[in-house]
Image: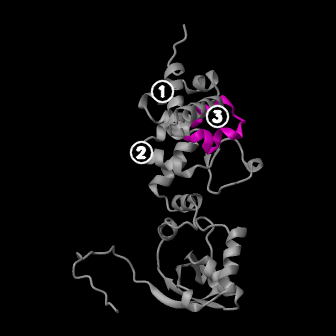
Amino acid sequence: MLRHIDIQNCEQVTPADQPAPMLDWIPISKIVMDDEYQRELKPNNWAAIKRIAADFHWSRFSPVLLAPIEGGLYSCIDGQHRTHAAAICGFDRVPAMITTVTKAEQARAFVHVNGSQIRVSGHQVYRAALAAREPWAVSCRDAVEAADCRLMMNNSTLAKDKKPGEVFCIALIRKLVEAGKAGAVTAGLQALRAYEPEKVALYADYVLTPWLTAVASDPAFVNADLVAVLRKRNPYQVIEAAERYAGVERLPTAPTKRQFFERQILEHGFTVAA
């Protein structure tokens, strides 16, 4: 059965005012990648490129998305894997949709095209969103940097490569900041920096998720003496105790760990020296 495009039951939508794109075959030599928002090609990316090249068919090649930039070049918004694969196959041109947009809009387009797909990590989405000056990304960066920490744009899987204050849990920070808890993010991270400045493991998701969600659970906790809370009982002991309790009582682990930190803050974060 064949169907035509039928929109009779849809309301008409007026799109944003914008120049119409062009379709053309563009020399690969004129296509460049802007590392401010494009992903770095790592071994897994090269493996994907080589898989595309090994079974290359134009019928499976959707036009790449480009934006003209100075020097007669084109910035690749989407399609760098396909373009590399075409080059490996000996082609010197690729079909492209060319849209004249600002650099910020190029980064926003990258986020929109790739943000919901598994092949682009949250770190890559954050980096592109920051390049586009997306409010959520700027707010996340600012909340973390206010604590003398850094929200990382790339994920490092090797512990030896990580440094104190480097925060990798993009999703957690974004969730808290978008919920209006940026102050809690800053306060929680500041406490960790003051507690053990050189301890890299404090910035792992294992610690940050229950700790920051606990600090964010009550507006009053932002003004608590959070360093005193951490010194009274170190966060690893709190987490281990919560995990044991959750196991015995058959409770969900994540909220139990958060609640244990909340209790610690209530008991030790508001004491007044005599």
Tag 3 secondary structure: helix
Q: Main secondary structure of the magenta part?
A: helix
Residues under numbered marks 1 and 3 in contact, where contact means CB atoms less than 8 Å apart:
no
Tell me where residue 200 appears, x and y as whole percent.
70, 40
Is residue 257 on the magenta stretch?
Answer: no
* Quadrant in which the C terminus appears: top right
Tell me where residue 33 appears, x and y as whole percent.
62, 74
Between 252 and 262, the one nearer to me in the picture: 252
The boundaries of the magenta stretch are: 189-209
* Residue 107 shows in the view: no
> Residue drawn 47% across and 28% down?
221
* Quadrant in which the N terminus appears: bottom left
Is residue 208 on the magenta stretch?
Answer: yes
Between 273 and 107, the one nearer to me in the picture: 273
Amino acid carrying mark 1 in the image = Asn
For marks 1 and 3 on the same chain, the one whose residue lies earlier in the sequence: 3
> Residue drawn 66% across and 91% down?
92
For mark 1, what is the residue? 223
Tag 2 secondary structure: loop
Tag 1 secondary structure: helix
Amino acid carrying mark 3 in the image = Arg
Amino acid carrying mark 2 in the image = Ala
Q: Which mark is residue 193?
A: 3
86 up-or-down from 49: above or below: below
Q: In whole angstroms, how far apart are the C-alphas of marks 1 and 3?
A: 16 Å
For mark 2, what is the residue? 179
What is the crowding at mark 2: few (fewer than 14 residues within 10 Å), some, or many (at least 20)? few
Q: How many marks?
A: 3
Tell me where residue 159 appears, x and y as whole percent.
74, 48
Q: In whole angstroms, how far apart are the C-alphas of marks 1 and 2?
A: 18 Å
Location of residue 198 (image quadrant): top right
